Image (cartoon, rainbow, N blue to C red):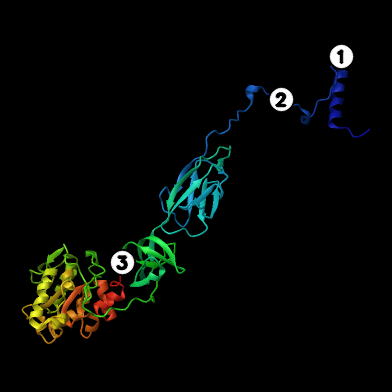
Amino acid sequence: MGPMTDGRRSLLRVGRACLLLVIAGAACAPITPTPTSTHLPSPAVSASQTPAHTPDQTAPGIVVQDPPPGGVVGMSGITVTFTEPVRGVDGAAFQLSDAGGSVQGSTVSLDPTRRIATLVPEATLSFAATYTVTLTSLVDDLAGNALPRTSWTVRTSDLVTFAPGTYTGYRFGDSTADLTAIKRSTLSSPSTATASEYRVMDDVGYLLVNAGIWRGYWIHGSPGGIAQDDPTAPIPPLPTCKYVDLPAVRVAYADWATTVLDTVFQLPSGYAPGDLVDTSQAGLNGSYYVRAIALADLTAMVAAANSNGARLAVQSAYRSYTGQVLTFDGWVRQVGYDEALQTSARPGHSEHQLGTAIDFRAVGGASPWTYADWATTKEGAWLAANAWRFGWVMSYPRGTSSVSCYSYEPWHYRYVGRAAAAAVHGAEVALRQWLWSQGYGVR
């Protein structure tokens, strides 16, 4: 006989107990083994006790769109946040397409814990363009309810960023053969502008800038809106000082600092600034006029000159087209037509019509052209050394007649603003040369 198990011991104990009852004259029930727990039948459960399991009947939705409809796509791409956990988010269900309907290659990911899906384009998107974001019904929740198909439009930025550098602007016609470098400018600090188009010509990308100093020009750049400096592209040469009447390129009142006027280019006869103020407001003798945009720097310059013993007065300031007719005719009568061309501008060609040019003299002094060299007077010398600091430049310096188109006039100053005046002074060239080198005179 083998070793006694717990069950056999239990039966033996029960049997002994029953034997004692029989001896005492009592009945004893039959002995049956008690089943172990692993053989117990499952308890019966009524239908009313069955746990309820009703499937979710609500389809998932979107609570956050970044960017929202009409928003600008950033470097981090496009994200959506769902109302509940979802599945099925991939490149077939979460797409970006261009205006022509072409789906853009993208990387799609899902953060199930935060319920955020992210789409990042694999290539740089077109500049200043509109795209469509689409989420299809392939996306569903954990109960199988499909997301309603939804779509919205987003756009890419139209912002152009300029790092410090030298940039060249271009204009072109119907073909790349018309592409011409016509404006150049150096930026000493970062800048931004907006643009309306990106185009590739001869394997080079260009951005059409529509604001700031580059308005209307194409600048080398990337579809991501990064302008690329271009300091070496050739600009058409400065034209000779022939006597013709061509319309000036920049004749808007806002172009006062960049309008090229010489013996070739002229203003319209009706050009007359509407913001003229009396020069007496700048501390000078009155009954002469200058544009209000020059007043603050003119006032500061007059005060600085006075503090240094140079007492400035106005010989002439703004002259209308009609006023220039009288002025030029007067010089013709005095010195003859050929000589007048050297010392006076024909109507429409005068910087005085801009309202930003002044002929100076000394307080109580004679007309400046009556001196052998007015620049040797206290007032003339002070202006020659300091006027640029206040945004004023001598238009016709000594020895520049072949490029400035007029005889030396140390009394004639034009206001172009402090930044441009500093650039002209640093370049040591006539104003006409500098303006042309920046492309302001070229069509």
According to the picture, the residue beneath numbered tag 3 turns out to be 213
- Which of the 4 image quadrants contains residue 407? bottom left
Q: Earlier in the sequence, mark 1 or mark 3?
A: 1
On screen, residue 190 versus residue 290, left or right, reads right
Disc 2 element:
loop
For this rendering, which residue is in front, 241 or 1? 241
- Check disc 1 and give the amino acid type: Ala
Quadrant placement of the C terminus: bottom left
Q: Residues within 10 Å of mark 2 (few under 14, many from 20)?
A: few
- Looking at the rendered structure, the number of numbered marks drawn on it comes to 3
| Residue 400 at least partly seen | no
Image spot of residue 188 (x, y percent): 34, 72
Disc 1 element:
loop
- Check disc 2 and give the amino acid type: Pro
Residue 395, label in figure? none
On screen, residue 413 versus residue 17, left or right, reads left
Q: Earlier in the sequence, mark 2 or mark 1?
A: 1
- Nearest to the eye among marks 3 and 2: give it: 3
Disc 3 element:
helix
- Check disc 3 and give the amino acid type: Ile
- Which of the 4 image quadrants contains residue 9? top right
Q: Residue at x 11, y 81 (%)?
A: 368
- Nearest to the eye among marks 2 and 1: give it: 2
Tell me if label 3 and label 2 are in contact, CB under 8 Å: no
For this rendering, which residue is in front, 393 or 18? 393
Residue 43, label in figure? 2
Alpha carbons under labels 1 and 3: distance apart: 124 Å
Q: Residues within 10 Å of mark 3 (few under 14, many from 20)?
A: some
According to the picture, the residue beneath numbered tag 1 turns out to be 24
Q: Residue at x 11, y 70 (%)?
A: 323
Image spot of residue 248 (x, y percent): 24, 70
